[in-house]
Amino acid sequence: MRILVITAILFVSTFIVHGQNAMQEGFTFLENGDFSKAEVFFKAYLEKEPANKTANICYARAVGLNGAPEKANTLFGNLLKEYPKDFEVAINYNESFLWAKQYKKAKPLYEDLIAEYPDKFAAVLGYANTLSNLKEYPEALVWINKALALSPDNQSAKISKKYIRLGYANAYVNAQEYEKGVKLLHAIFTDFPGDKDALLNLANIHLITKDVTKAKNTYKSYATSPQDSITALNGIALAEHIDENEKDALEIATMARRRVAKFDNVELKKRTYERYVQALIWNRKFRTARKQIDSLETTKINGNWVLALRATLGMYTGSFKISLASYDAILANDSKSFDGNLGKANALFASDRIIPAYAATYKTLEVFKNQKDAVGLIEKMNIVHTPTIEEHFAYTFDNGNNVAVSNTLNAFFPFSSKFKTTLSYQFRTTENTISGSKADSHVLLGGIDYKLMPLVNLNTVFGINNSHFITDAYTLPIFDTKLLIKAFKLQFLSLGYQREVQNFNADLIGRKIVMNHYSLNYNLGTNVNLGWYTQIMRTEQSDDNSRNLLFTSLYYTVLQKPALKFGLNYQYISFSEQLPTIYFSPETYQAGELFADIRGKISENTTYMGSFATGLQKVEEDPKTPIFRAEAAIKHQFGKRLSGNIYGKYSNIASATAAGFQFTEIGAKIKWLFTKKPWILDLKTKQ
């Protein structure tokens, strides 16, 4: 936070008391902040009286405050040689370093000055401001209090103390010590009741901590004038977005946009138009948002903020190339832009360019130390690339009296952003409680995942299946490979081959049926909330049977938070040979159903999902029968490295592997990131 150094009025007042009436006009220029006129005045005055100390000081001050602090520093330095023990010259010389933002050079000079003049208010105030600019806030507060002890009612010192507290509070916010920041901001109201800067900073903390009610109340306190009420509406719209009330956010942002047209405040218009377009994007009104951005680009107030809006729209619509181009344009204009740096990092991550994303995020943290969102992005990428162990326990039973218990241990080892390995072991035991048939299987798998290029991955798993059935046992190889492609925006395609051994129940394990699946999966998303998923699979079996399968789903996203989808599913299955006494293998099977899927948060660390489907199924020429499927799960994040979930699912839809129509499974999963950091080397590699 920028800390203001307010000492001009103090020095001008001193000169008015001790100076000459002939310089009164120049003093007035300085006092009113008209430094250009003051510079001209005192330059002309010095042509008549070049040795006048006061005129030289005032001229140098006018030069420095008019945008040439280095020149002022030289002028004061020359004066200091002429008046080596003069306090007024020394204090101005020191202050010229502050104008030039050379705070480290100013600090020892002020320390020498206050050692010699401990009771000089200007010296103590200047030292406090120097410490503040160096972000040494605890010491700055000590010295500003000393300055106020020397001059209790001095307004310049009170204003400096306010900005020291603002800077100190911001440091606490960056360190995520929000309560300490709030306490400092409230202290500002002692000297400045209802201070607008303090209110805005308080509201920002409440937004960060997602205390939406306090944020909105703080903005309401801020709205004491027509223009301030627009700023408040912009803040309340953001609060509604954080509270996931997107329609309310758009309604409030629209109100602010309508009101701001009455004012000529350019900055206020920028902030208001920006919030309005953001609210359009939050509500997925992408076409309207795009039109607004296009129109803003033709106005005089166009700038980085409009580029940021176009980049945001690209992120929401999956147009990451457009986002990257916009963020690069922002950084070309301002290399230290927060929106440009962190936005680019997010766009690179979304584009699956992991190492450049890390580099961009670390660059953001170099400029904005400990910034919460940047730290969060690093943690998000770390989680994806940290070695992980997952334990999965499941208990299943069906109406054919088959019961199964399985335990699966998965280990995930990413060695680079492109190369990852997996290791999996499953033990599954199954029994038919009527016939007494029992079987168990041990499956050991090893796999690799290699990124051929961003958004194109080759995943291959190979291993063995060792099964035991009564007195028989066998071991067979298994294999699974997939090519995963995101070729176009919002479109995903996978091509796969899988060799697996049938292990649904004890009888099927005993038959040693090997299945070879050839599959194609395609998912098409849109920016109008519609989606379409299709799976086509051909299965060749070792018992000379074969299966064709088609599954297609058309769905519509009704809500984003919680994510709520409704849709239609259609499934078609056909076997070349019908073996009903062995396993479900109809000549034709069709099913159509309506489904709903909901996913959301119970709390910050607990999420839920529920999926329900119902419809009709028809096996060959048999009458149609009803379908019902349901699945529910709750997941809890116990810490950054440990999570777990429990789930249950039920289905009576016919399956090529289920000799029956009712199937139930309950289970639990535990996931642990067993190292604190990824194993990826050179995370700070530059692009």
Image (cartoon, grey):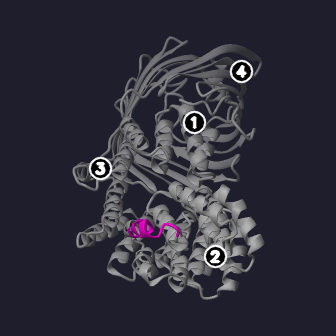
| Most common SS among magenta residues | helix
Pointers 2 and 1 in contact (C-beta within 8 Å): no
Q: Amino acid at mark 4?
A: Ser
The residue under the point 48% across, 36% down is 348
Give me the disc on residue 359.
1
Query: What amino acid is at disc 1?
Result: Ala
Give how far apart the Cα atoms at labels 1 and 3 are: 30 Å
Q: Amino acid at mark 3?
A: Phe
Q: Is residue 184 visible?
A: yes
Alpha carbon separation for disc pair 3 and 4 = 54 Å
Residue 686 percent coordinates (x, y): 57, 31
Q: Earlier in the sequence, mark 3 or mark 4?
A: 3
Residue 45 lies, in percent from the top left, at 42, 70
Which residue bears the numbered disc 2? Answer: 122
Callout in the foreground (2, 3): 2
Write down the region rendered in magenta. Answer: 41-51
Label located before the other in sequence (1 or 4): 1
